[in-house]
Image: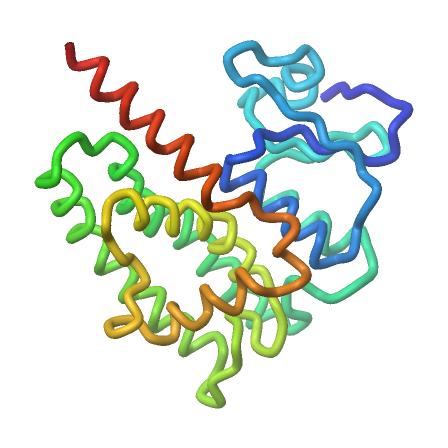
Amino acid sequence: MAAAAGVELRLLGECLSPYCIRVKQALAVKGVAGYEYVEEDLEHKSELLLSSNPVHGKVPVLIHRGAPVCESLVIVQYVDEAWAGPAILPSDPYERSRARFWAAYIDDKFFPSWEPFFKSKTAEDRAETFKNAIPAVETLEKALTECSSSEGKPFFGGDSIGYVDVALGGYLAWIKAVDEVAGTSLFDEAKFPRLAAWAERFAAADAVRDASPAVEDIVVFYKKMQAAETGAEH
């Protein structure tokens, strides 16, 4: 895959994409700064994006010393290995495999159960989607207990932000925005106390706060999505 040379580190992204958000968060956790961020118009993809990711033509793409790395979780692992700084993946092989399992669960099971909210047109649709997403949230609550150990450590990664935290953290601002618009509470404190506490800690962490979009910006975008979906019916 070809990519433009001349820039040490460049990230091709879309500012509100949860997959791009998680890459920015991973770079922040590792203390990687000074990279060039390129906002892509996904309606009119740049030649750089298409040449850097010819298989999927999607963001994010991290271009390091002219070599492109694609797919957000792959990029997060690359960032962890390529730069010094706080570890994102555990050093123990078993713990590392468990972190990869739960990160895959977030993308393959949790997000698909919740994603229909974006196209829900009625209160009934939203209620049904919310109901269908709850089992996956229950599983994540148990996973947090398992990953952070019986000592009640603050993150999936234990005492510090790790791979599963970043995997789920990319969606967090979206979850809060959808809750605000739809009047829901996906990580309800009464039902999911550990996830609710995790969400507050993660969002407030210095390492990721500046790498995350404002919830208000996503609220505006989500309302436009809803309006577009409603208009498409007529």
Point 65% across, 13% down: residue: 46
The tally of labels here is: 0
Q: In this view, does 128 lie to the left or right of 197?
A: left
Point 46% across, 46% down: residue: 215
Measuring from the top left, give residue 116's x and y in whole percent.
25, 37
Rendered view: 141 above or below 61 = below
Point 56% across, 10% down: residue: 44
Q: Say which of 107 and 186 sits in front.
A: 186
Q: Say which of 78 and 172 sits in front.
A: 172
Q: Say which of 15 and 116 sits in front.
A: 15
Q: Is residue 27 left or right of residue 58?
A: right
Give the position of the N terminus as an image quadrant. Answer: top right
Q: Which residue lies furthest to the right in this view?
A: 6
Point 42% across, 45% down: residue: 174
Q: Which residue lies furthest to the left in this view?
A: 124
Measuring from the top left, give residue 117's x and y in whole percent.
26, 39
Measuring from the top left, give residue 179's x and y in whole percent.
30, 50
Rendered view: 56 above or below 43 = below
Measuring from the top left, give residue 85's x and y in whole percent.
80, 63
The image quadrant that residue 121 belongs to is top left
Q: Is residue 188 left or right of residue 41?
A: left
